[in-house]
Image: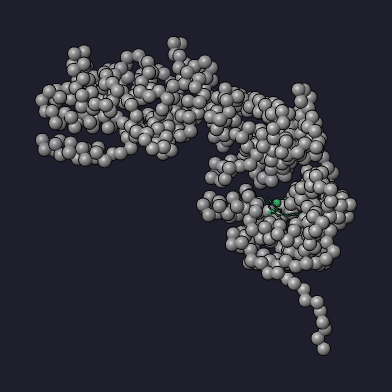
Amino acid sequence: MPTKTKQKKIEEHSFQAEVTQLLDLVVHSLYTNKEIFVRELVSNASDALEKFRHIQLVEKETFDDKLELEINLTTDDTAGTLTIQDFGVGMTHGELVENLGTIAHSGSKAFLQALKEGTGPASELIGQFGVGFYSAFMVAEKVKAYTHSWQKEGEHLLWTSDGVGSYQIETVEGQRRGCKIVIQLKEEDKDFSKADTIKDILTRYSSFVQFPINLNGERVNKIEALWLRGKNEIKEEEYTEFYKFQANAFDEPSTRMHFSADAPLAINALLFVPKTNMEKLGFMRMDAGVSLYCRKVLIDDKPEGLLPDWLRFLRGVVDSADLPLNVSRETMQDSALVKKLNKLLTRRFLKHLESIAKKNPEEYLEIYKNFGIFFKEGITSDFTHREQLGKLLRFESSSTEKGSLTSLADYVERMKEDQKEIYYYFAPNRETIEAGPYLEAFKTSNLEVLYLFEPIDEFVMSHLNEFDGKQLISADQAEVQIDDISQGPGEPLSRDEETELCKWIKKQLGERVDKVTGSKRLVDNPAIVLNADKMISPTMRRMMKAMQEGVAANPKVNLEINLSHSLIKNLYSLSKTEDELAIQVTEQIYDTALVAAGFNEDPRGMVDRIYQLLEKVTQR
Ligand code: ADP
Ligand code: MG
């Protein structure tokens, strides 16, 4: 006779496609360093408790409100299970679907993106990102998450999955507030159901969790705020572990700054520069990553405004006893105190970088290579720190070897006595700059030129405008005054011939050139165009053109000709006899000079002309 049981409702859900993809990888390709799943789950538990602590401050009514804010782990090596329970915020039905059925975690998203872009093999990438909750499936045959939300009207729920394609949600009465995750371990991973194994992992990974952690009823961590301890008492490994914990990072920090002050503000700060720049690798814009605490209590883990935007790559903690404890995240952003903290921290951090650059240039260059782009962003966006940031810039130059960098300060040291300006020139690489016509005059006059390779560099220079009282100026500016160095083989054209030829060329080129003159700055090249428009460089022009219609492709330029160059001398004779060829040659000289300047964007006319000229040459 069939017994009548109450039909239990079990809902079947499919994972979002990306989750399935991620889980497949987690289960099949990632065998190294499995133990990180413990750290991921404990950090989720700690996040959930932290969230609850905030909710408690604003909500009168919460479910199961007498519970301690703690994390309890239980091992059972007979059953082969590991259980991690927290009394944090828990999840509602909707939150279960959203958080454990889709990819909410930005790290996992970045991870998948990296995989798609083929940045590296999965096993290496996972080390850089972590996959959060899903990492449990590295070791789990089945994961059960029992939960009740902090909200009184929440349900008593159980989420279950074996990590293949789908998960189930059902109602199971009797849950406490928070989340209890039970991991049924795979046969080969049963080691994680042994107390000793887990204890060992916890002592390494979780000593900075700001809530009590108990393993089988015994307390394993002592809660301490590393940033409040004296520098001398802290071991190198402790700093590194703290960084990994706090930034949820897998790399090691490339530098750190730990300082405290009593005046003008009571402040303890521990800031880290990571080793990898995720934005540079092509991932989405980073969130601010320095948490704000007041006397060990977390106020906000991503506070806007605590540091300038261009310092968003920093990780760490700032603790100020001057903050009112009940400060809300909303009001905090505009508070005068946060502005003061921002100013103080930024100045200190920039000083810290300067001192590394001085004491340990190699170490600084490593940081600069990864994060220099942020300093440049700062120069273009943050007027207050522009000058200090200028000191941090590094470039190749005509006085450095290929690949080694110099600072603006060192450039100034090397300046000739009567030199008033700092020169730079932008091109995609060193070879292009050195082969082009712009460097000739500077080289011959012994004037150093900084080489700019990144498109943003010209903006940076024009925003910085000057350094140490010296104007920063592009080598292709018409206004640059340099000594007369022109000296080709043989006699140059006479003054009269020069005037005559220049007039003739100007007539041919018309409005396309502002002025045509004999040049003082050419040696091997027959002609050069100079930017007559002081503020707008070729790169900027291209960007402006991309952004708005109506900006002419070619800017106003001056054409300078090398009066000693045989081509120019030939042109002079030609201009009197064979007019049509002379015009074509003039047009070609102009176009070629534009190309050398990086201006010419529409080479079609030029291509036809070159063929015609070649035809004439081969007719001889
Ligand atoms: P992340 O922690 O980076 O957000 P995870 O994959 O680790 O990513 O977790 C996904 C989401 O699941 C979390 O953002 C959180 O909303 C939810 N979650 C995970 N563990 C818990 C927990 N113990 N209590 C409450 N919510 C949790
Ligand atoms: Mg997490």
Q: As displayed, is residue 130 above or below residue 548?
A: below
Displayed quadrant of residue 441: top left
Displayed quadrant of residue 598: top left
The residue closer to the viewer here, 547 or 220, is: 547
Camera sees residue 230:
no
* Residue appearing at x 77%, y 63% in the figure: 157
Displayed quadrant of residue 10: bottom right
How far across and down, in percent of the image, does residue 275 sit?
Answer: 62, 40
* Residue appearing at x 35%, y 23% in the figure: 532
Total number of numbered labels? 0
Q: What colour scheme was applied to this rendering of the protein? A: one colour
Q: Is residue 83 left or right of residue 102?
A: right
Quarter of the image containing the N terminus? bottom right
Quarter of the image containing the C terminus? top left
How far across and down, in percent of the image, does residue 195 sit?
Answer: 82, 57
Q: Is residue 514 left or right of residue 324?
A: left
* Residue appearing at x 40%, y 32% in the figure: 541
How far across and down, in percent of the image, does residue 576 sit?
Answer: 12, 23
How far across and down, in percent of the image, does residue 162 sit?
Answer: 69, 67
Q: Is residue 444 left or right of residue 115?
A: left
* Residue appearing at x 78%, y 32% in the figure: 323
Q: In the displayed image of the protein, which residue is found farthest to the top?
A: 418
Q: Is residue 497 left or right of residue 445?
A: left
Q: As displayed, is residue 160 above or below residue 254?
A: below
Camera sees residue 158:
yes
The residue closer to the viewer here, 31 or 320, is: 320
